[in-house]
Amino acid sequence: MGKAIFKQRNGVLGVGIVTPCGFITPEQLCGLGKLLPEVGALGSKLTTRQTMVVLIPEEAFDRFVAGIRNLGLDVGVFGDVVRNVKGCPGNGELCHRSLGNVFELAVEIQQQYMNQPTPHDFKISVAGCHRGCTDPHCADFGVIATGPKTVEVFLGGRGGSRRPQHGQKAYVNIPKESIFVVLDHVLDTYRKLAEDHERLCNTIGRVGLDPFIIQAEKLPGTVEEDEFADFLNS
């Protein structure tokens, strides 16, 4: 599995730093402010995938990696793996459009799945409402909250391409806790059916969406069960 380390034309390294879905603490930010001048960084740039790329001299790489790990950060991933997750920060306290608090879900997905091998790079985006600020329609696996406890899932989106396309809606109003079962199934099916270095959208275009679908009655939990449990506990 590859690391997000890119040698630039001028010889310096561009090194991607991964965070929990773009979240960084004040202490980490202050630590980076001290570390970057110490390693001779030329500058840094925030990416559309909620990471930070830092330009450093190649000879400073080991010192830089040790420094960011001391801050609780790490080098990002690249290549044919599950990439870092783009997660919406919105919830009822931060965004008036949010239908469900999904940031913790996005962080948990990243912790469990990032850097797992896949036939092609596999991007996941999680959004708290239909506006989709994290571009879930353009991700291989896009999650959108439809309520406090329910989400919908889009499969096979592709952005950043000469042929971008939106994913297909595959799961509607499923319990939020079933996401991990769905994602396991999608990844296992993708690994079994994909041709060499084939993007998920092309695999779906070749074999159809049906192999990636788990019937609703086989998913753990139902919305009705959750609501009944809430009634009993109230």
Image (cartoon, helix red, strand yellow):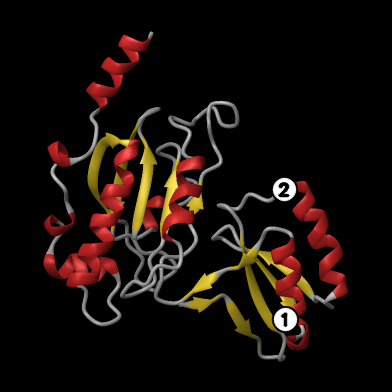
SS under mark 2: loop
Distance, label 1 to label 2, CA atoms, is 23 Å
Label 1 sits on residue: 61
SS under mark 1: helix
Determine the residue positioned at 84% across, 78% down.
Answer: 40
Q: Nearer the viewer, residue 217 or 8?
A: 217
Determine the residue positioned at 23% across, 29% down.
Answer: 222
Residue 62 horizontal side relative to residue 50, left or right: right
Q: How many residues crowd mark 2 within 10 Å: few (<14), some (14–19), many (20+)?
A: few
Label 2 sits on residue: 25
Three-letter amino acid code of the residue under disc 2: Thr
Quarter of the view holding residue 72: bottom right
Q: Position of residue 216 (x, y in %)?
A: 16, 39
Q: Nearer the viewer, residue 97 or 177?
A: 177
Q: Position of residue 5 (x, y in %)?
A: 60, 79
Three-letter amino acid code of the residue under disc 1: Phe
Q: Position of residue 22 (x, y in %)?
A: 60, 53
Residue 198 horizontal side relative to residue 7, left or right: left
Q: Mark number for residue 198?
A: none
Decide which of tag 1 and tag 2 comes sooner along the chain: 2
